Image: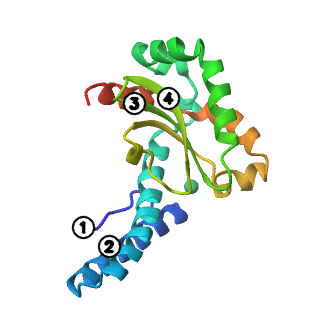
Amino acid sequence: MLFVCLCAILQHHAAYVSNLNTSLQKRDDALSREDLAAVIELDHAIKFNGGGHVNHSIFWTNLAPVKHGGGDFEGNASQSVVNAIKSKWQSVEKFQETFNAKTAAVQGSGWGWLVYDPADKQLKIQTTSNQDPVGSLGVVPLLGIDVWEHAYYLKYENRRPEYLKEIWKVVNWKNVAERYTAALKK
Ligand SMILES: [Fe+2]
């Protein structure tokens, strides 16, 4: 199966998609040759590039310019997600503070996530390394923040905490709320 990148202008996302497609094709070939070692090797590339595609696809929809409601938690998130966040972390500010502290501490490249855990019906903050897809941990991603250096270095250089502080101004809470509503049905 081939995936089509909707964000072709974003070169690094396009590279993940291109490498994913190449790896999937090579895996099919290796499987038809019954070359198990090559299949296992290609599974690593599929996890990395497929994860890059999945993670960035969530990330783009999680963001919105201020003029389109970016950053507007009270006005743009549904009441159910507002209540769920306040019930777990007391306030959105406290939630963001906790999220930023955990995400800033990711060693090397990775992601910070707000997820819904269907196992105990709780919102949680999770981090992942590299391009590991958080969904593989059995949780549903609602909001993902990219903390690879490529996400912030041009504007913030090595100041990851400053990037994390500013990113909330463009979080698309409407999208997060839609993901939460869908997650509750799982
Ligand atoms: Fe990225």
Give coordinates of residue 85: x percent, y percent. Answer: 51, 18
Q: CA distance from mark 4 to mark 1?
A: 32 Å
Pick out the residue farthest to the left. Answer: 32
Disc number for residue 117: 3
Disc number for residue 24: 2
Q: Earlier in the sequence, mark 2 or mark 4?
A: 2
Q: Earlier in the sequence, mark 1 or mark 2?
A: 1
- Residue, x 44% and y 19% (percent of image)? 81
**Type of amino acid under label 1:** Met
Q: Quadrant of residue 79?
A: top left
Give coordinates of residue 82: x percent, y percent. Answer: 48, 15
Q: Which residue is mark 4?
A: 124
Dot 2 alpha-carbon crowd within 10 angstroms: few under 14, some 14 to 19, many 20 or more: many
Q: Which residue is mark 1?
A: 1
Q: In this orientation, which residue lies closer to the viewer: 128 or 72?
A: 128
Q: Quadrant of residue 22?
A: bottom left
Q: Could you tell me which quadrant the N terminus lies in?
A: bottom left
Give the number of the mark in front: 1 or 3. 3
Give the number of the mark in front: 2 or 4. 4
Name the side, left or right, on which 45 lies relative to 29. right
Callout 4 touching callout 1 (CB < 8 Å): no
Q: What secondary structure is marked by label 1?
A: loop
Q: Earlier in the sequence, mark 4 or mark 1?
A: 1
Give coordinates of residue 11: x percent, y percent. Answer: 53, 65
Q: Could you tell me which quadrant the C terminus lies in?
A: top left
